[in-house]
Image (spheres, coloured by chain):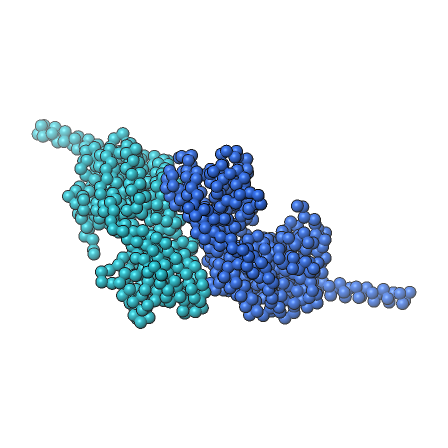
Chain colours: A cyan, B blue
C-alpha cells in the first residue's frame, strides 16, 4: 500500500505537473501568438511588400510577360525574407489578352460608353457589331425571355450590386457575368454587355471572368461602368430602341507556363504537417493588383516572415502559397491540389487571403463540429485584435475552396469588404486604396492564426461533408 | 399758415404713404423672391434639365459634332420652356481633338500609366517620345531648375491639389497645367506631364486647358492620374532614372462655328436693363459634362423658367446666357462681351454658375462699396435657404469675369466645392455625381437672386476698380 500510495502520489504529482505544464504550454502558445499579433500590428512589413509588388511589377495577367516578372519578384522577395524553403511549381495557364474595347450608342443619342471586355471573351468581328439593345434586370429575367425578343440583339444585363460588409452582393450579381454570354447566345443574341459588378459610381468598367459552353455560340461579352448603365437606362426610358455599336479585340493565345510560388517555415517537431496560408499572385491588368490580390500576398507573406523570425519555430510547417492564375478560374489552386494530392492528409488547415485589405472581424472554420468549442477557446485571444469567434461554415477562400472535398479543414478570416467592390477588377485597384493600419491588422490575424494552428493539439478532422 | 399747414400735412401724408408703399413694395418683392425660392426647392426642373442634356447629348467639346447637337438641344429646350425670347449668337471656336494617349514606364519597372492629353496640346511624333522623367514638386521648382537638368527629359510636375470647400486648391495647382509646357520647353524638355489637378484618388486623369507661347517650342502636355503620380514617385524613390514612353495624338483643326444660346424673360418696366445669369454649354469630352457645366446650365435655365412663369414679371429683363467654349479659354464669354459692348451699361448685374451642384452657402458681390449694406439687407431673406451674406470680392464666374473691367457689377453665388475636384474634367463627370436636392437649392438661390436684382432700386455702380 505504501508503495501503491507512493505510486499514486507520484502519479498525481506527475499528472499535476503534466497538467500544469500543459496549461503553461497552452498559455505560452496563446501568449506567444498574441505577442506575435501585437508585433505584426506595429510592423509596416505587409505594406512594404504590397508597395514593392505594385510599384516594381504592377498588373500581372496570367501568362503575360508581367506574370513572369511577378513570379521572379515573388521568388526573390521570399528568399530575401529568409524563409527556410522557397520553391515554385509549374502551372499551365491560359493566355488571354484584353485588346481594345469601344462602345458607342449610335442612336437615338450618340455617345461613347466606357466598356471593358470580360475575361475570356472572344472578339467582335473586325467591323464590330451594331444592334439594338435589349435590357434585362437579371440573368434570370434573360433566361425567362422569349427567343424572338432577344434574337439578333445585344443583351444588356442590368443587375445592380448591393453593398455589404460581407461582399454578399457580388455573389448575387456574378452569375450574370459568368453565364450571361451562354444564356444570351442560346436565344440568338449577338453579344452581351453587363452592368459592372461593382458598388461604386465611378465611370470605370469592372472586368472579371466569363465562361462559354460547348455547343453554344461564343458571343463577345463586356462590362460597362455603372454610370454608363444608368445612361442606357435613361435612354431606354426615352426611346425603347437604343442602338449600340461594339468593337472588342481580345485574343486567346493558347497556354503559357506560370508558377505557384511557395515559401515555408519548417516546423520544429511535425515538419511534415502543413498549415497553409495563401493568396494569389496574378491580377487583372487594368489596376496594379493592389487589393486583388497584392494585399493577400503581402498579408500571408508578412505573417509567414514574422513566424520565420521567431526564436522558437512552431511544431508544424507554415506554408505560404502564392497561387498562379486565380482570376482565370482558380487555376493555381487546382494545380496545387493535384500536385499535392498525396500530401493532402498532412494539411492540418488552409486559409487564403483574397478580399482586399479591410480589417478582419471574424474567424470562421470548416472543421469537425465536435472540436469547434476547443478551437474557439484556443483562438479567443484574437478578440484583442478585433477578430470575433465565427461559425463552422468557412470556404477557406477561392484557391483552397477545393481542399475541403479532399478532407482538408479550412478557415476563413472574414474581412470588412464594404468598399472592396468599389475598386475590384478596375483601374482603381491601386496601392492608395489600402489602409496600412487595416493591412497590418490582417497580417496580425494571419500570423496569430497560423501560429496557433501550427502548434495546436486539436484534431480537426473529419470535417463535415460539403453539400454539393 | 393754414394753407401752409394744410400743405405740410398733405405733404406729410404723401410722404408717409409713399414710404409705406415703398416698404410694402420692398416687402412684397422680398416675399415674392422667398416664395420663388421655396417653389424652386420643391421643383425637379433643374435635375430634369441636366438629365436631359447629359443623356440626350452627353459630352460636347467645342466645335465637335456633339457641340452642334448641344446648341440645338439648348435652343429647343429654352423654346419649349416658353421664354419670352430665345436666340443664339455666333462664336468662332478652335477645334481640338483629343486623339489617343498612351504612356508606359519602360524602365526600370515597366508599367502602363493612365494618361490624357491636356486641352490644346500638340501630338508627340508618331513614333512617340521616350525619355527619362525629371520630377518637380511645383511649377516654381521647375522654373528654378538648371537647364542642363531638364534638357531632353520629360518634365513631371507633381503638384498635389488640396481639398477645400472653396476650391482654393485648384487655383494653386492650375499654373502647372496652363504654363507647364512653356516653362519646360524653355529649358529644353521634350514633353511635360502633370499630376492631375484633382482631389480624388481615382485612376482617372483630369484634363484641362494648357497654353503655348509664341517663340517657345510647343511640346506635348498631358496629365496622369493621382495614383499614377504616386506610382512614379515610388519608382523614383527606388531608382532616380525612370524612363517614360509617351504617345499622344491630339489634333488642332482650325475653327468652327458655335453659339452662345440666350433666353430672356422680358422685363415689365425696364426691359432694356439686364440681369444676366449664365453657365457654359460646352464640356470636356470624357465625362458627360454633368457637373461641369450641365449643372450650371440646369440651374440658370430652371431659375429663369421659374421667373418666366410668375404672374407678374420683374422690372428688368432676366437674361439666361449659355456660353460656348468656356473650357477652351472663356471664348463664349469674351464673344458675348464684345457683341454686347454697346449694351454693357445696361447690364445691372451678372453671375455665372460653373462650380458643379454643391449647395450655395454665400453670396458675394462686386458693387459700389457704399451700397453693399443695402444689398445685404435686400438679400437677407436668402439666409432661409442657407445663403449667408458675403463680401465685395466677387469675380462673378469665368464667362462674366471680363465684365467688371467694363464696369458691370457681378455676384458670385459660392457653392460648396468640397468634392468638385474629385470629378472635374474626368470621365467621372456624370449625372450620378449630382445631388438633386443640392441642385434644387442652387436653382432656388439663382431664382431668388435674379428676381431681387431684377426689381432692385439700388444703384450698383460704379464698382471698385479691379487691380490687375
Expressed as whole percent of the image width and height from the top left, the position of residue B276 reads: 63, 60
Q: Quadrant of the C terminus of chain B?
A: top right
Identified at 63% across, 51% down, the residue is B394
Expressed as whole percent of the image width and height from the top left, the position of residue B230 reads: 43, 41
B205 sits left or right of A371 in the view: right
- Relative to A417, does residue B237 appear above or below in the rendering? above
- Farthest residue, direction right: B1
Count the numbered circles shown: 0
Identified at 52% across, 45% down, the residue is B218
- Relative to A297, does residue B261 appear above or below in the rendering? below
Q: Quadrant of the N terminus of chain B?
A: bottom right
- In this view of the protein, which residue sits in the foreground, A54 or A169? A54
A148 sits left or right of A456 in the view: right
Expressed as whole percent of the image width and height from the top left, the position of residue B155 reads: 48, 40
Q: In this view of the protein, can residue A392 be seen by the observer?
A: no
Q: Quadrant of residue B382?
A: bottom right
Identified at 17% across, 30% down, the residue is A13
- In this view of the protein, which residue sits in the foreground, A273 or B303? B303
A430 sits left or right of A86 in the view: right
Amino acid at each position: 500500500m505504501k508503495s501503491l500510495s507512493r505510486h499514486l502520489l507520484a502519479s498525481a504529482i506527475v499528472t499535476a505537473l503534466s497538467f500544469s505544464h500543459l496549461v503553461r504550454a497552452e498559455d505560452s502558445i496563446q501568449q506567444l501568438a498574441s505577442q506575435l499579433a501585437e508585433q505584426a500590428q506595429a510592423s509596416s512589413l505587409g505594406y512594404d511588400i504590397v508597395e514593392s509588388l505594385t510599384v516594381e511589377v504592377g498588373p500581372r495577367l496570367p501568362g503575360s510577360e508581367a506574370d513572369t516578372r511577378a513570379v521572379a519578384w515573388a521568388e526573390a522577395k521570399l528568399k530575401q525574407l529568409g524563409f527556410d524553403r522557397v520553391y515554385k511549381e509549374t502551372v499551365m495557364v491560359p493566355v488571354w489578352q484584353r485588346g481594345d474595347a469601344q462602345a458607342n450608342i449610335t442612336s437615338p443619342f450618340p455617345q461613347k460608353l466606357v466598356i471593358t471586355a470580360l475575361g475570356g471573351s472572344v472578339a467582335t468581328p473586325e467591323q464590330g457589331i451594331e444592334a439594338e439593345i435589349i435590357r434585362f434586370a437579371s440573368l434570370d429575367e434573360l433566361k425567362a425571355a422569349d427567343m424572338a425578343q432577344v434574337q439578333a440583339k445585344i443583351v444588356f444585363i442590368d443587375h445592380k450590386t448591393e453593398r455589404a460588409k460581407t461582399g454578399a452582393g457580388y455573389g448575387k450579381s456574378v452569375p450574370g457575368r459568368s453565364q450571361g454570354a451562354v444564356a444570351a447566345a442560346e436565344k440568338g443574341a449577338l453579344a452581351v454587355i453587363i452592368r459592372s459588378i461593382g458598388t461604386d459610381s465611378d465611370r470605370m468598367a469592372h472586368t472579371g471572368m466569363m465562361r462559354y459552353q460547348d455547343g453554344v455560340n461564343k458571343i463577345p461579352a463586356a462590362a460597362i461602368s455603372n454610370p454608363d448603365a444608368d445612361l442606357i437606362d435613361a435612354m431606354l426610358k426615352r426611346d425603347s430602341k437604343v442602338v449600340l455599336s461594339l468593337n472588342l479585340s481580345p485574343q486567346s493565345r493558347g497556354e503559357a507556363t506560370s508558377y505557384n510560388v511557395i515559401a515555408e517555415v519548417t516546423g520544429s517537431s511535425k515538419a511534415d504537417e502543413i498549415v497553409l496560408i495563401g493568396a494569389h499572385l496574378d491580377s487583372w491588368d487594368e489596376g496594379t493588383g493592389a487589393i486583388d490580390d497584392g494585399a493577400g500576398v503581402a498579408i500571408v507573406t508578412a505573417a509567414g516572415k514574422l513566424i520565420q523570425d521567431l526564436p522558437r519555430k512552431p511544431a508544424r510547417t507554415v506554408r505560404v502559397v502564392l497561387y498562379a492564375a486565380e482570376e482565370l478560374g482558380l487555376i493555381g489552386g487546382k494545380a496545387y491540389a493535384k500536385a499535392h494530392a498525396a500530401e493532402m492528409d498532412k494539411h492540418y488547415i488552409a486559409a487564403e487571403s483574397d478580399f482586399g485589405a479591410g480589417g478582419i472581424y471574424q474567424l470562421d472554420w470548416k472543421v469537425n463540429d465536435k472540436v469547434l468549442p476547443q478551437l474557439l477557446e484556443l483562438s479567443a485571444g484574437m478578440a484583442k485584435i478585433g477578430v470575433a469567434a465565427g461559425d463552422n461554415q468557412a470556404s477557406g477562400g477561392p484557391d483552397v475552396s477545393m481542399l475541403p472535398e479532399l478532407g482538408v479543414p479550412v478557415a476563413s478570416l472574414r474581412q470588412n469588404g464594404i468598399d472592396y467592390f468599389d475598386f475590384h477588377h478596375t483601374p482603381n485597384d491601386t496601392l492608395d486604396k489600402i489602409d496600412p493600419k487595416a493591412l497590418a491588422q490582417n497580417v496580425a490575424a494571419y500570423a496569430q492564426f497560423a501560429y496557433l494552428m501550427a502548434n495546436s493539439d486539436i484534431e480537426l478532422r473529419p470535417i463535415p461533408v460539403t453539400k454539393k
